[in-house]
Amino acid sequence: MIRQVALQSPTLAAREDALVLPLYKGKKLSSGSARIDRAFGSVATLLMSDGFTADRGETRMASVKRGRRLLHTILLGLGDASQATPEDMADAAGAAAKVLLAHRVPSAAIYLDDAFAGSSLDAGEITHAFVKAFGLACHQLKPRPGARLSRLSLRTSMSARTLTPAVSRARLLVDSIVQVRNWVNTPGNEMNPASFTAAAKRTLTGGGVTCRVLTRAQIEAEGMNGVLAVGVGSREEPRFLVAEHALAKKSWPLVCLIGKGVTFDSGGLSIKPWEKMNEMKSDMAGAASVIAAMTMAAELEIPVRLVALAPCVENMPDGSAFRPGDVIKLASGKTVEVLSTDAEGRLILADAVAYARKHYQPSLIVDMATLTGGVLIALGTRVAGIMGNSQRDLDDMRVAGDRSGEPVWQLPLDERFVSMIKGDVSDYKNYGGRNASVITAAALIGTSAGTTPWVHIDIAGTSWNDGSGASYQSRGATGYGVDLLLRFLEIVAARA
Ligand code: BES
Ligand code: ZN
Ligand code: MN
């Protein structure tokens, strides 16, 4: 864990164990980097000559002995300066962090001036990407013993005052994402709707956020029969988390964030095959990211009114479980026939969207959910799928995805897809067939949104790293979506 991040001038001596020299493709080492290189043993030129091409994420390391200390220098390739994105920058930075972690190096200086020069990104974005990637790379699924990277010194001739906000934001973000990862990695026997919402409430409360958790009886009174039905097969009763922030600021836009909180998804009676069913402990990743984003948005004082909602259930098969063929009346008043009890997320989210509209009349609803296996097939593990009814908000989500390094891609959602879930015995059915399954799942949630602007984010692919993830992601939960939501809220606040 990184405990200290300092911004310092580039000429200081080697007080750290390692020096990281980031470099764009085709660029020479600057005079500034040559100076700091001398302090760390003058090995950069040697490393450059070792076939180093500065491809993004490429690293070269050499170490020299200085008295009783070992000093390491790592050249880090950043790829093309004119095409750098926050995601690429963080991915490259993470590669250097991994080298330091592998060698159990406790402290490092990172020389940033060469990364700033001629880049398509501004210095704040680059600094943010480095601090974020180094912080996140330190989080390991199974921590190994030994010395750990704990101290960073960012060396730059840029004024500390311009870069401090980026450093602080990135450090908050790292803590927040690590929190999400830990929640999402927690197995189902250690996390149920009651314990998850209790932990979430502890995180949320304070800093102007108020939070309450609805019990089963209250969920029933609200007519959220989708939540009740999905949860009824589990001994663990459902919960519904409601958090509010700055609602009195009537001139600010009111955004409602909704996260899918299935603490374990066995599929219910439409039970899943055993392979990878263990990964379904991660089916509350949407709720976790929404809760973390809400907490951080309040800390950062982003000028938006916020409501976070998380329907939390465990989806289990049991003598009392809901069944295929059951018809459920959702909080929207619409009826749905259950074709698969494994298509549970859309039922609880449709209820939550209806609850949001009834109680808050928000200017915008965003839901985030590990909704479909289809999105993993369509977009893989690095890009989330977005759909909705408001093109301006979808466009802004695209921009937020690029800025955060958590990219999204829009899929179409219109009447053609709603017609695929029209019911035979009810208004709708909860499964529209294999075709366009990502979209028809979203379409059911959309039936509750009506005319309220709504964006749905399917994170079933991006919330979990099977090994194909970014350099700074550990295996398992990624914490994807926190920065995306924050960037989006910043855009919404700025356009208001
Ligand atoms: N939680 C799953 C989606 C999921 C799949 C998340 C893989 C993460 C990784 C969701 O509840 C689900 O089961 N979806 C099914 C629905 C289908 C059976 C109608 C799907 O998309 O396969
Ligand atoms: Zn699920
Ligand atoms: Mn399911």
Image (cartoon, rainbow, N blue to C red):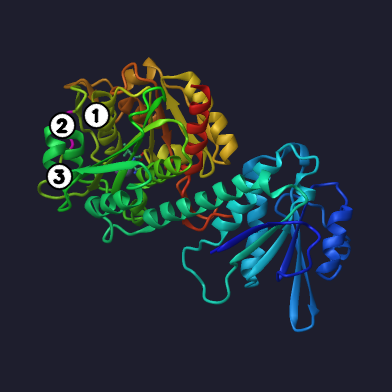
Q: Is residue 100 visible?
A: yes
Callout 3 secondary element: loop
Per the image, the residue denoted by label 3 is 232
Among the two numbered marks 2 and 3 on one chain, the one whose residue lies closer to the N terminus: 2
Q: Is mark 3 within 8 Å of ligand 3?
A: no
Give the secondary structure at mark 2. loop
Q: Quadrant of residue 361?
A: top left
Residue 391 relative to residue 242: left or right: right
The residue singled out by tag 2 in the image is 222
Residue 68 shown left or right of residue 148 in the figure: right
Q: Image quadrant of ligand 1?
A: top left
- What kind of residue is marked 3? Val
* Residue 311: in magenta span: no
Q: In the visual, does 487 lie left or right of 96?
A: left
| Label 1 near ligand 2 (CB < 8 Å) | no
Give, as a single range, the part of the protein colored magenta: 324-329
Is residue 325 shown in magenta? yes
- The answer to whether the residues at label 2 and label 3 have Cβ atoms under 8 Å apart is no
| Quarter of the figure with residue 352 | top left
Q: Give how far apart the Cα atoms at labels 1 and 2 are.
A: 8 Å
Left/right of residue 43 with respect to residue 401 in the rendered view = right
Please name the amino acid that badge 2 sits on. Glu
Marks 1 and 3, the one that precedes in the sequence: 3
Which of the 4 image quadrants contains residue 39?
A: bottom right
- Asked if the residues shown at circle 1 and circle 3 are in contact, with their CB atoms under 8 angstroms apart, the answer is no
- Residue 333 location in percent, x, y? 18, 22
> Do the residues bearing badges 1 and 2 touch, measured as CB atoms within 8 Å?
yes
Q: Which residue is identified by label 1?
A: 355
Q: Nearer the viewer, residue 79 or 342?
A: 79
- Taking the spot 35% from the left edge, 19% from the top edge, the residue there is 452
Q: Nearer the viewer, residue 445 or 403?
A: 403
Give the residue type at disc 1: Tyr
